[in-house]
Amino acid sequence: MPAIIDFYADWCGPCKAIAPVLEDLSEQYNGRLVIYKIDTDKETELSSIFGIQSIPTLLFIPTDGNPMMQKGALPKNALENVIKERLLQNKDAETGN
């Protein structure tokens, strides 16, 4: 299943702004996409492994193809475009959605 990993911190304003958008998308694409949240303050080693230097950073992981990383808080329509065009494109073709 494709996934989005949200690298965030509780003190980060843009992270707080994007959180409800990601929650909405998680509900909207339930069963077709998984959204994980990684607190960079608590998971410093994991954040380091992924090379996270600024937050929020989103890692988009398709089932096929290469992952894509995006720094900064994206608006909902931009996130939906990435989900439809990069993460679910092949999956929807298989299911007929």
Image: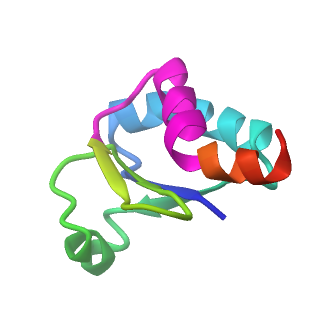
Q: Nearer the viewer, residue 69 or 15?
A: 69
- Compared with residue 34, is residue 81 higher up or lower down, i.e. above or below? above
Q: Is residue 66 visible?
A: yes
Residue 74: image location, x then y, percent: 40, 27
Residue drawn at x 67%, y 36% as measured from the top left:
25
Location of residue 63 by image quarter: bottom right
Q: Is residue 62 left or right of residue 44?
A: right
- Residue extent of the magenta highlight: 71-87
Residue drawn at x 84%, y 43% as measured from the top left:
96
Q: Quadrant of the N terminus?
A: bottom right
Q: Is residue 64 left or right of residue 42?
A: right
Residue drawn at x 56%, y 39% as measured from the top left:
83
Residue 35: image location, x then y, percent: 60, 54
Q: Nearer the viewer, residue 27 or 63?
A: 63
Q: Nearer the viewer, residue 67 or 65?
A: 65
- Compared with residue 55, is residue 7 higher up or lower down, i.e. above or below? below
Residue drawn at x 63%, y 51% as measured from the top left:
90
Q: Is residue 80 magenta?
A: yes
Q: Is residue 44 magenta?
A: no
Q: Quadrant of the C terminus?
A: top right
Number of numbered discs on residues: 0
The overriding secondary structure of the stretch rendered in magenta is: helix
Q: Is residue 88 visible?
A: no
Location of residue 43 by image quarter: bottom left
- Compared with residue 42, is residue 73 higher up or lower down, i.e. above or below? above
Residue 85: image location, x then y, percent: 53, 36
